[in-house]
Amino acid sequence: MAVNASPSPILSRPLAYGATSLGILALAWVLATSVLGWVGPEVLPSPLAVIARFANLIVEPFAGAALFGHVLASLERWSYGVFFAIVLGVPFGIFFAWVPWFRAVVNPVFETLRYIPPFAWVPIAILWFGASTATQAMVVFIAAFPACVINAQLGVQHVDNILVQAARVFGADQLNTLRRVVVPVATPSIFTGIRIAISNGWMALVGAELVVGKTGLGFLIAQGQQNDSVSTIFVGIIAIGVLGVLIDLCVQRLERRLMPWQLP
Amino acid sequence: MRRIANGNLVLVSAAACVVWIAVWAWITRSGGPVSSLFLPSPGDVVERFGRMWVKPYIGSTLLGHVFSSLSIVLAGWALGGIVGVPLGVAMAWWPRVKWLVFPIFQLIRPVPPLAWIPLTLVWMGIGEPARIFVVFIAALVPWLMNSMQAVGSVDPLLIDAGRTLGASDGKILTRIVCRTALPTLIAGARIALGNAWTTLVAAELLAATAGLGYVALNASRMLDTDVLVVAMLLIGLLGVLLSLLMKLATHVLAPWSLSQQKG
């Protein structure tokens, strides 16, 4: 069942099957839309129409900006939200695990709020900040923050107590133990949290932009829907997916660079 | 963990709860620093919560909105299971099915389920089918991935033993594979339900005429902050309840998995 990576002619079979199924899908798409015309462009645009729309959106503004402008607007909000989630969430999580009374005090609030999904915050964010960048950034923050806190906390909690005691025996104070022993050991877990936060934030951003905003990829597809331009929706969806994958790849790269001992 | 005993920490937590609510009440009191348009006082929220049980708010009572949300979540979640589990099992059992389906799946997976909402609105209009479809997409991924993993992780030795003892393919699937795979499958069901709930709230913000997300967005537009907070807390509470129910299901359906996890 498991496919290992040694090169042999049989192992290209999965690839062949994959290519076949994707090819059939693409062929069906072309046949149904362009050749046979079973489904009209108001339901499913042809691949050519999507490509043409993509080229068109790059040069011509739609819904306030060209495609690149929407991408930048989305990325800007997303990076604000994720930045604050990491900068606040990671120390918060470390502190959470290290100082029991702090955790006891804050946990009831944290647990209550954590169970409210990020999108349920959209209406109240609109109320607080209006249709501004801050609204979307807040939703991204709320989606990303718990992952940072929880994984930092788990990382610190799972640090071997013997290491901590050894550091103490050698005369390290609390701060030094934390900085020299606990945080480095917890780093992989912290990074896992950051990675989850980054992708959660991206998903939440799309949701927030669908509801409120005047630019961004979510807004682009919402406008595509309002104008009955399905090809625009397709371009938007593809852009969101591709950017999501690219962001994840960048994070993986960074992870490998920063912690070469962690990954194969 | 350190120095303070566990019992004391529970006390600290309980005291903290009281203090937090007191702070909330104090800052939102009439004439206080935070206006009720920004954040309602706890008293207002409780009062509004009581009133919404009996008096309809945009179309139905609170219970009606809860039912509307829950029925769509369950429908989308169940549909995800009906499609996802057989497909996942087939993908793990016959490599060819996996080779055929997996690339398409990988192509669709990076797109957040929410991004499908505008497309479903065009295809199906504002209504229950559109919401069920979006929830279905959100639930399908964990259902499928976990059932595939569940079957794939079965010890081949057990299968060989079954075969040696003369079991047919069908029997091996039902008697060995399904039983070993159940815990992973239930974990998938739990993740699927969580995803479904989160996604439903977003879908209700965009394409609904009932449900808690719809209530929340309308409350925000009409500046009914107390209604908004009621809806948010209820969404959180129902999320917790659904997750507890799934934990209970694990206890009932696959009790052996619990001791396994600890060991």
Image: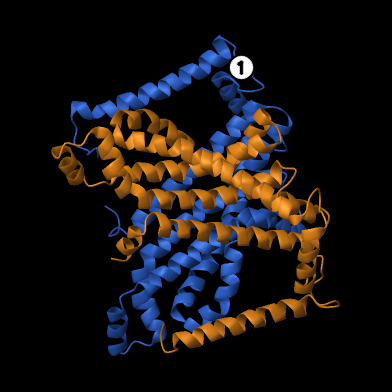
Chain colours: A blue, B orange
Viewer-nearest residue: B140 or A13: B140
Which residue in the rendered view is the most extreme toward the left?
B164
Q: Amino acid at mark 1?
A: Val
Q: Would residue A66 be seen by someone viewing this image from the given angle?
A: no
**Within 10 angstroms of label 1, few (less than 14), some, or many (20 or more) residues?**
some
- Asked where in the image residue B254 lies, by quadrant, the reply is bottom left
Percent position of residue A82, x then y: 55, 58
Percent position of residue A135, x then y: 69, 56
Identified at 68% across, 54% down, the residue is A122
Image position of A249 with respect to B93: above or below = below
Image position of B7 with respect to A219: above or below = below
Image position of A35 (left or right of B160)? right
Q: Would residue A101 be seen by someone viewing this image from the given angle?
A: yes
Viewer-nearest residue: B215 or B255: B255
Viewer-nearest residue: B61 or A154: B61
| Numbered marks: total | 1
Residue designated by label 1 = A39
- Quadrant containing the N terminus of chain A is top left
Q: Secondary structure at mark 1?
A: loop
Percent position of residue A181, x then y: 33, 76
Identified at 51% across, 44% down, the residue is B139
Image position of B109 (left or right of A164)? right
Which residue in the rendered view is the most extreme toward the top?
A36
Percent position of residue B124, x then y: 66, 30
Image position of A149 (left or right of A17)? right
Image position of A147 with respect to B26: above or below = above
Image position of A139 (left or right of B101)? right
Identified at 26% across, 37% down, the residue is B171
Identified at 45% across, 34% down, the residue is B107
Which chain does tag 1 point to? A
